[in-house]
């Protein structure tokens, strides 16, 4: 068995001020943490900006799609109008033919009466 001996001199340590290097390391740790927070904020800000850019582009795409739909409707309407104009033109041509036939008949009748 071993005996424990107590030293005769006092072993209690007196508090000594931290060395300047120790304070710097704490300050540098705090600074590093602040920088980490800043660098963490930068990606979030970048992501928010990217999301805003995507939203803006999405809105533009939606507007383009709406414009395309409007153009398609307008094209269909124009096509229908063209068809209607063609039908009216055909009807006018038929009417003109009928008038010409009637005039021809009238002229023939007039010629017969004037002989």
Image (spheres, rainbow, N blue to C red):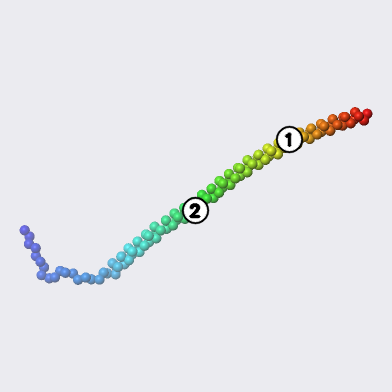
Residue 76 location, x and y as percent? 63, 40
Residue 37, above or below 59: below
Query: Closest to the observer: 10 or 51?
Result: 51
The reply, left or right, for residue 90 in relation to residue 67 is right
Residue for badge 2 = 53
Between disc 1 and disc 2, whose residue precedes? 2
Assess disc 2: are there few (<14), some (14-19) or many (≥20) residues with their C-alpha within 10 Å of its C-alpha.
few
Query: Closest to the observer: 29 or 64?
Result: 64
Residue furthest to the front: 113
What secondary structure is marked by label 1?
helix
Query: Closest to the observer: 67 or 48?
Result: 67
Q: Residue at x 65, y 39 (%)?
A: 80
Residue furthest to the left: 1
Residue 81, above or below 35: above
Residue 46 location, x and y as percent? 44, 56
Q: Residue at x 51, y 52 (%)?
A: 56
Q: Residue at x 42, y 56 (%)?
A: 44
- Name the mark on residue 90: 1
| Disc 1 to disc 2, C-alpha distance | 55 Å
Marks 1 and 2 in Cβ contact (< 8 Å): no
Residue 62 location, x and y as percent? 53, 48
Q: Quadrant of the C terminus?
A: top right
Residue 14, above or below 91: below
Picture quarter containing residue 20?
bottom left
Picture quarter containing residue 78?
top right
- Name the mark on residue 5: none
Q: Residue at x 45, y 55 (%)?
A: 48
What secondary structure is marked by label 2?
helix
Q: Quadrant of the N terminus?
A: bottom left
Of circles 1 and 2, the one toward us is: 1
The reply, left or right, for residue 88 in relation to residue 57 is right
Assess disc 1: are there few (<14), some (14-19) or many (≥20) residues with their C-alpha within 10 Å of its C-alpha.
few
């Amino acid at each position: 068995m071993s005996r424990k001996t107590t030293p005769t001199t006092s072993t209690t340590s007196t508090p000594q001020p931290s060395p300047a290097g120790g304070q710097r390391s704490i300050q540098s740790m705090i600074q590093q943490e602040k920088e980490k927070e800043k660098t963490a904020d930068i990606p979030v800000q970048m992501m928010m900006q990217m999301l805003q850019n995507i939203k803006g582009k999405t809105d533009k795409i939606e507007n383009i799609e709406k414009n395309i739909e409007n153009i398609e409707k307008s094209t269909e309407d124009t096509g229908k109008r063209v068809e209607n104009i063609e039908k009216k033109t055909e009807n006018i041509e038929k009417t003109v033919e009928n008038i010409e036939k009637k005039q021809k008949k009238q002229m023939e009748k007039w010629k017969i009466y004037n002989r």
